[in-house]
Amino acid sequence: MIKIVYPDYKAKIKQQAGKEMIFDEVRKQWVLLTPEEWVRQNFLQYLILVEKYPAALMAVEKEIFLNDVKKRFDIVVYDKHSQPWMLVECKEMNVALNNSVLNQALRYNINLQVPYVVVTNGSYCYAFKLAERQLTEITILPVFCK
């Protein structure tokens, strides 16, 4: 398990039609601030500010199809060749990071074929490297190769 220490970052938050909205710097749009969205936005900032992953190579909440069923992944980081490199599945803070959460991410990876899968609930995360059909837990996030 990896303990995440978030950077000091001031989220842009506003009220709109009686609902709290947060500005997503990657999607460049205001989105409803839910507990899961709070985790997603903070983890994005961690990846960008601490891990130095380029925001321009990230996608958030994009649709994919699994057996003709439309799903949305939370975060995908692409490598410098625009190939999917890391998949991040975010859950709200009170959700346990268990096999069900990992299996959800692995199902998304059937289409994406990333070498790294991360699951997080905002407080902790588990990271895994996939190589030669083996899933190995890693204790630090991989360095982004520029």
Image (cartoon, rainbow, N blue to C red):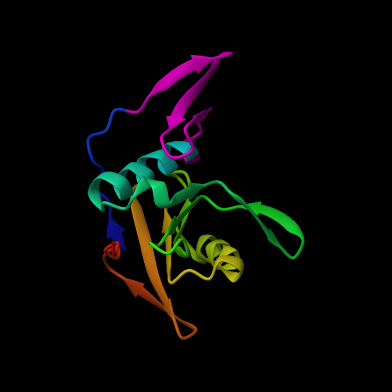
Q: Nearer the viewer, residue 15 or 124?
A: 15
Q: Residue 6 at what x, y percent from top left?
A: 26, 43
Residue at image point 37% right, 46% down: 55
| Label tally | 0
Q: Magenta residues?
A: 11-36
Using the image, determine if residue 117 lies above or below residue 10: below
Q: Residue 17 at what x, y percent from top left?
A: 59, 13
Q: Residue 107 at what x, y percent from top left?
A: 60, 67
Q: Residue 110 at what x, y percent from top left?
A: 60, 70
Residue at image point 77% right, 61% down: 68
Which residue is at the far bottom? 132
Q: Is residue 33 left or right of residue 107?
A: left
Residue 82 shows in the view: yes
Q: Classify residue 13 by image quadrant.
A: top left
Q: Classify residue 86 by image quadrant.
A: bottom left
Which residue is at the far front? 81
**Is-magenta flag for residue 24?**
yes
Using the image, determine if residue 31 lies above or below residue 93: above
Using the image, determine if residue 50 lies above or below residue 33: below
Q: Is residue 106 left or right of residue 132?
A: right
User: Looking at the figure, which quarter contains the C terminus?
Assistant: bottom left
**Is-magenta flag for residue 5?**
no
User: Looking at the figure, which quarter contains the N terminus?
Assistant: bottom left
Q: Nearer the viewer, residue 15 or 113?
A: 113
Residue 121 shows in the view: no
